[in-house]
Image: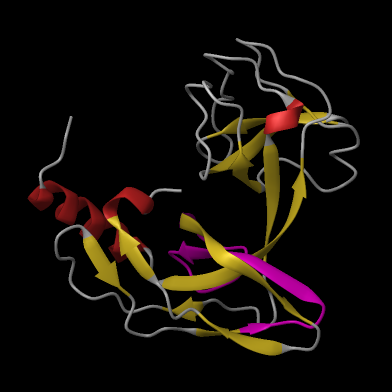
Amino acid sequence: MSLTAYGADAALTGAIEKMKFANLFSSVTKAPTSNTAIAASLINMTGSEAAGWTNGKMVYIKALTGAITNILPKRTYFIVGMTANGFELAEEEGGVAIKVEGHILETATTEFQLLKEINATGKRFATKFKAVTLRTTEDENKPEITVPAATTVTHAGWFDNETIAAGKCHAVEALTEAETFAAEGKFTLSSDKLESSKTVA
């Protein structure tokens, strides 16, 4: 189904009604330690559980072997089915594990980023999106987000609940450039512009 501009605007309007709060993520980037075969779902990563790659955590696909058809790069998934040395990915928290299709998942061409939500204040930051026009909207609030010392921020996220660790994340976007804070500081989410093709994590 191909949405017209009206349909796309309606879909984006519905999404931003849930995206009342914004926050930032830091991340750890790792490649799998061995390939995953077609029709298999376990991502092999030695020591992953001990390193915090556990059920419910969010993983952003930074790079992915070409020709894989049912996992997409630049998209966020949830860890399910963790083991000591691997995990599976699902579209939803606690959801059905996705099997690799189209091509084997190769270590040399795949990178995952484990997302960790920034928690300097215990709360997320309010958004105020403009009315959607031609598949596009922008946050008028441009939230100024407190970042703890010794933190590198890599992604932004939009949520339906103000409290850290509560509610659901409805969108994730990688920052154009990561930014490192040696001391506690503020990050202004000034390019908080969304298009209908980028609103579903």
**Could you tell me how many numbered marks the image carries?**
0
Q: Is residue 101 magenta?
A: no
Q: Does residue 123 lie above or below 107 as drawn?
A: below
Residue drawn 42% across the image and 75% down it: 191
Q: Does residue 69 lie above or below 10 as drawn?
A: above
Q: Position of residue 142 (x, y in %)?
A: 42, 83
Q: Write down the quadrant of residue 199 in the picture.
A: bottom left
Q: Write down the quadrant of residue 181 in the picture.
A: bottom right
Specify start and end residues of the magenta stretch as a single range.
146-170
Observer-nearest of 197 and 57: 197
Q: Is residue 162 magenta?
A: yes
Q: Does residue 79 lie above or below 14 as drawn?
A: above
Judging from the image, the colouring scheme is: secondary structure
Observer-nearest of 152 and 13: 152
| 98 relative to 83 in the view: left or right | left
Q: Position of residue 60 (x, y in %)?
A: 60, 47
| 18 relative to 155 in the view: left or right | left
| 76 relative to 137 in the view: left or right | right
Residue drawn 64% across the image and 15% down it: 104
Residue drawn 12% across the image and 47% down it: 7
Q: Position of residue 159 (x, y in %)?
A: 46, 64
Q: Position of residue 184 (x, y in %)?
A: 75, 88
Observer-nearest of 148 and 80: 148
Residue drawn 62% across the image and 32% down it: 89
- The quarter of the picture where the N terminus appears is top left
